[in-house]
Image (spheres, rainbow, N blue to C red):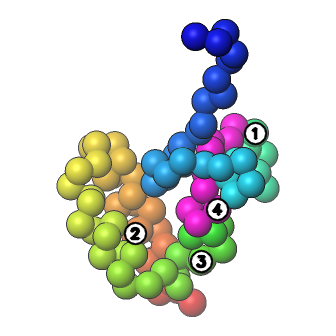
Amino acid sequence: MSGRKTEEIPICFYCGALVGRHDGQGDHFPIPKNQGGRVTVPCCSTCHDMKDRFPLEKWPAAWISKVIEDFPNLNRETRIFLAKAIRYFEEKRARK
């Protein structure tokens, strides 16, 4: 061994891809930066775009289908939270 310290390469919090120095970003999670969030997680630029630049109302049907497929694999609290969030956004959209 050379004694050199190896740098750990972070993986994207959302998809698990390796996050490079030039394409990676820190994503404020669970509280968004504009709401005072200070904690960040490693995030690839693709996931960052999907999370921050695509409004939920404009998500393609293919993305929503993947969420529905994966839904049973999540823990109980996550499923309940997501169900409440979906209900909230659907009720908000219905009031418009």
Q: Quick one: 64 or 43, which is closer to the camera?
A: 43
Where residue 40 appears, as percent x and y from the top left, is 68, 41
Q: Are marks 4 and 2 in contact (CB under 8 Å)?
A: no
Check disc 3 and give the amino acid type: Pro
Where residue 36 appears, as percent x and y from the top left, is 78, 46
Mark closer to the observer (4, 1):
4
Q: CA distance from mark 2 to mark 1?
A: 28 Å
Crowding at label 2, few (<14), some or many (≥20) Cα neighbours within 10 Å? few
Assign a secondary structure to mark 1: loop
Q: Earlier in the sequence, mark 3 or mark 4?
A: 4
- Whether residue 32 is visible, yes or no, is no
Q: Earlier in the sequence, mark 2 or mark 1?
A: 1
Quarter residue 68 falls in: bottom left
Residue that numbered label 4 is attached to: 45
Check disc 4 and give the amino acid type: Ser
Where residue 50 appears, as percent x and y from the top left, is 57, 70
Q: Residue furthest left?
A: 72
Residue that numbered label 2 is attached to: 87
Q: Residue at x 46, y 48 (%)?
A: 16
Residue that numbered label 3 is attached to: 55
Mark closer to the observer (4, 2):
4
Q: CA distance from mark 3 to mark 4?
A: 16 Å
Q: Quick one: 90 or 31, which is closer to the camera?
A: 31
Assign a secondary structure to mark 4: helix
Check disc 1 and give the amino acid type: Arg
Check disc 2 and give the amino acid type: Arg
> Does the magenta portion include 93?
no
- The part of the chain drawn in magenta is 39-47
Assign a secondary structure to mark 3: loop
Q: Earlier in the sequence, mark 2 or mark 3?
A: 3
Q: CA distance from mark 3 to mark 1?
A: 22 Å
Q: CA distance from mark 2 to mark 3?
A: 16 Å
